[in-house]
Image (cartoon, coloured by chain):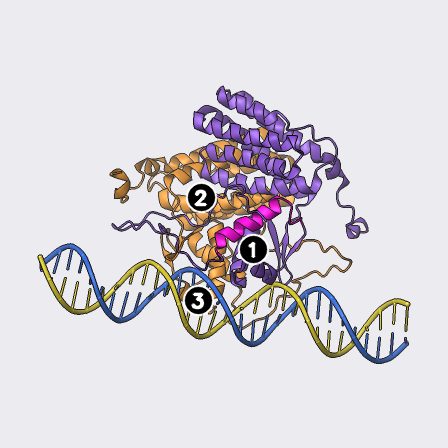
Chain colours: A purple, B orange, C yellow, D blue
Amino acid sequence: MKTRQILQDGAGTEERPQENRGAKVVRLGQQRRAKAAVGADAEAIYRRILAAIIEHRLAPGRKLVEERLAAVFGASRAMIRQVLTRLSHEMVVTLVPNRGAFVAEPTVEEAREVFEARRLIEPALARKLALSATPAQLARLRELVAAEEKARAQRDRQQVIRLSGEFHLEIAEMAGNAILARQMRELTLLTCLIIILYDSPVGRACPEDEHRRLLEAFAQRDQDTAAALMLHHLDHVEQSLDISLAAQDDDDLERIFS
Amino acid sequence: MKTRQILQDGAGTEERPQENRGAKVVRLGQQRRAKAAVGADAEAIYRRILAAIIEHRLAPGRKLVEERLAAVFGASRAMIRQVLTRLSHEMVVTLVPNRGAFVAEPTVEEAREVFEARRLIEPALARKLALSATPAQLARLRELVAAEEKARAQRDRQQVIRLSGEFHLEIAEMAGNAILARQMRELTLLTCLIIILYDSPVGRACPEDEHRRLLEAFAQRDQDTAAALMLHHLDHVEQSLDISLAAQDDDDLERIFS
DNA sequence: ATAAACTTTTTTGTCGACAATTTATTGACG
DNA sequence: CGTCAATAAATTGTCGACAAAAAAGTTTAT
């Protein structure tokens, strides 16, 4: 059971050191305490659960039993609880009072809303990055695209989804607006779940080279093209879901007889 | 110490019932349990602390000591802790490991980012609402604007800030995209803090009638005007901060000698 | 055999106690 | 008199135990 660094947590982390008002700047957390060898670190557990969800090892709707997780990670239930509430705030997990935690299952309505939000935000981020991208940043993006293409060649769908999300998130973080990057992180994670849930089994002719073309627009500082490509790209991804999206819920009988 | 319903929590609440997969739909939480008469309900405590922050009774930077709060609300420390982590996820409170919780103090950089984000999102929401606003919704908005004008007449700055935020949030929720409404809630709350921190003591000639004009655009289904007015409005608000915004941090000596 | 009522088991929610860390206070020394 | 170190107080972090609720299983009656 590998752990795999996933969708790096960079921007949206909980604790922001905050400048000290007095004179002595203490540089807190400079040395990580060892703790028990088993490793009951909230951050690590958070990452592993998130990774499992993104990589579809924990399917949407799956119940997450606290005690079970505590046993798996050799942690206390309180610690698991902490992680689950964080995941629920990030909308990756749904917390139902007195019933427990479940991997989120975004509805079709939510899916539409997520893409609507992304269409508002991401073209603007693409435009910003096209203006400011450094060679190092472009190299990093090239890396990601290469990894994605490789995964695609190997038909490793999970990795394609993950890397695609990471590409978009990286762009958001590079664009230089931490608030928007944080929001994009949420939207990107949700999108991973949405694709898992509603991806049409056929087709998938969409992103293929679109990430690469986007990258080229960045390299050439072509803001308009970058923004336009991003917009079209998002439309393509959403449309590749449309088939299932129209079909709505099949097993949800109640709503039919309302 | 009045409690005052504040920036209603509608959209972004923690527990979303989620449809039951089986047959029996249970409608959980239909009856609120009584608990101890003192009232140790997490939701209520959350609202009261948030209200205190928005209304500036808890100033930015103020330390929030768990045990103290627990005593005030007659609740356990664990419950306070739960509320504080929720507030920290909403960026209203900053949680510093081993040091405690503080009312957030957005930096000037963050302030700029918040407004940049709002400029991307809110004109689009205004456009949507202009297309779909019902008479009931317009009436509700009129109510808010009236209340705001009244508060302004009474020179009750706190209430003006609060009601102004509520106006924007209401628009976001009416626009029919729960995801964006949730994000706007965060941005609105942050904006309240930013205004408290960086408002220029003079001027304040900005919003005056702008909310009302925006409202008129909604009433006349004029999408373009609504979007344009929203954009200009945001610019005005941000510019009214600019004087202080340029001044940056005065007491932060460290950064000067880096 | 089915469905309701009851019992058992599992799982979540809450609290208080203890450990670890930070902050304030005191005292000693240059 | 101020600076540094040692001690005391206050505050946060973590855990296990118990209570409350839900789910599963069992019995009984129709």
What residue sits 34% from the left and 40% below the top? B200
Segment colored magenta: A39-60
How far, Cα to Cα, is label 1 from label 3? 23 Å
Q: Is residue A30 left or right of residue B116?
A: left
Residue B16 found in image quarter = bottom right
Q: Is residue A241 left or right of residue B141?
A: right
Of badges 3 and 2, the one in the foreground is 3
Instruction: Give residue A230's mark.
Output: none
Q: Which residue is mark 1?
A: A84
Q: Is residue B9 left or right of residue B245?
A: right
Of badges 1 and 3, the one in the foreground is 1
How far, Cα to Cα, is label 1 from label 2? 28 Å
Q: Which residue is mark 2?
A: B191
Q: Give x and y (percent) for residue A12.
A: 48, 44
Q: Give x and y (percent) for residue A173.
A: 48, 36
Going from N to C along the chain, the mark reached first, 3 or 2, is: 3
Number of numbered discs? 3
How far, Cα to Cα, is label 3 from label 2? 28 Å
Query: What amino acid type is highlighted by mark number 3?
Result: Ala
